[in-house]
Image: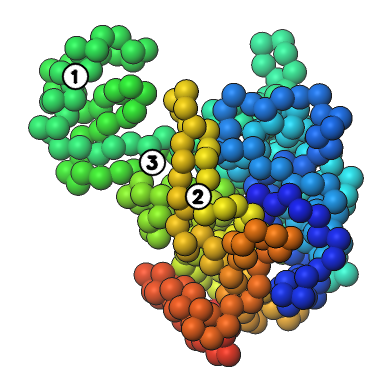
Amino acid sequence: MLGPYRTSLDKIPPAFAQVAALIQQSDAAFANQEGSSFDLSSFKGATAAENGGGYPIHTLDTMRNLHAMGINLLSRANNHSTDWGLEGLTATDVAVNAIGFTHAGTGQSLDAARAPGILNTSKGAVALVATASTFPGMSPAGDPDRGAGARPGLNPLHVEPVTLVTTDEMQALGKIVVRGGYQGYDLPGATPKEVHLNEKLFRVSATPGLTFDVSDKDRAALLASVSTARARAGLVLFSIHAHETRSGGYEDSDPAEFLPTLFHDAIDKGASVVLRHGPHAIQGIEIYKGTPIFYGLGHLFFELPKTITIASEGPHKQTVTLPEKWWEATAATLHYKQGKLQQIRIYPLIINDRDGPEQGLPTLAKGVQAQAILKRIQERSQPYHTQIRISDDIAIIDQF
């Protein structure tokens, strides 16, 4: 992920040079742009009332330098896509397009946001399909409706969290709902199986916990986009911005249950690589039918102090101390021969958290730091039975 980063990269600092070289040597390099890019001095819009946790912005010089460095594929679909309103989304799309990025996940209509981006390289075409399941309510693109034109926005996968409760818990909830009166939903009967309370959905289950209802329409459209991409390119990347976890905890390393099944279906439709972003900490890796699924590689750039003040749902801002592991990350390189994946190399990174011109930039981790990061990847990949070996501060996967 390209986290908040404002500084122009006119010169590559020596400590960052090895990471930059990994990008420069690639035919195609992907990143999720978690923020906006435009000339703020001439911007006619405003900050949106809803945001993804702030208003990160990348300077146009930074984006030009990232493109010159070799990053050429951008996902634009995430919870920060509309921080600066639909005007900011549009201005950013125009800017990254003019710089030369192939991007996907946002557009001036739902069809445009769903469409794959196609990058032509000397080795063949690479397609990108990008979506998000984590986003503010104003962010999704829309079709023309009620005599009006299409709505700019992102390519949504609508999901609704459902809290699973026991029968006894549901009886208590039902009484609370009735006491609160009509909330836009039918009031529950004597033995409710499902209720809405303060716009939260609760459902009776033999196993209490958390699940997610997924829009069948959005899901089918995503898989159709992957099929379209496969018909146009030899390599297809499927990207999703998804904070959802199995427990609902932000730092949970287990993804929400709808994600692995979606990823498997995307691969069955032709995806060559699946990339989930959203988690700020490193997650596991799965190999499904010889195809890699990255559940979270962490940040590539992350220029934030460890204690920040952010907007909240209430009238007052909130001060938050961020976890140390948010400054540990990875970069993965995939090596193909005649269209077949031969090897994945995972490079551990440490992101500079100190004030100054190199704040937010990654460097290659070495020694004890590298081993700790790589062993965490091994541990978080064990549920998927992924074979990962560590050699010279690099994790390697070559068993597909």
Give above or below for 168 relative to 197. Answer: below
Residue type indicated by callout 2: Thr
- What label sits on residue 212 in the rendered view? 3
Give the residue at x 38% y 41%. 212
| Along the line of sight, the residue nearer the viewer: 378 or 228 | 378
Instruction: Where is residue 62? Give x, y as percent.
Output: 80, 53
| Mark found first going from the N terminus, 2 or 3 | 3
Give the residue at x 61% y 66%. 351
Instruction: Where is residue 373? Give x, y as percent.
Output: 49, 75
Give above or below for 349 relative to 131. Answer: below
Residue behind mark 1: 176
Residue 396 found in image quarter: bottom right
| Mark found first going from the N terminus, 1 or 2 | 1
Instruction: Where is residue 208? Give x, y as percent.
Output: 21, 44
Residue behind mark 2: 307
Give the Cα separation between the discs numbered 1 and 3.
Answer: 23 Å
Q: Does residue 192 appear anywhere in the picture?
A: yes
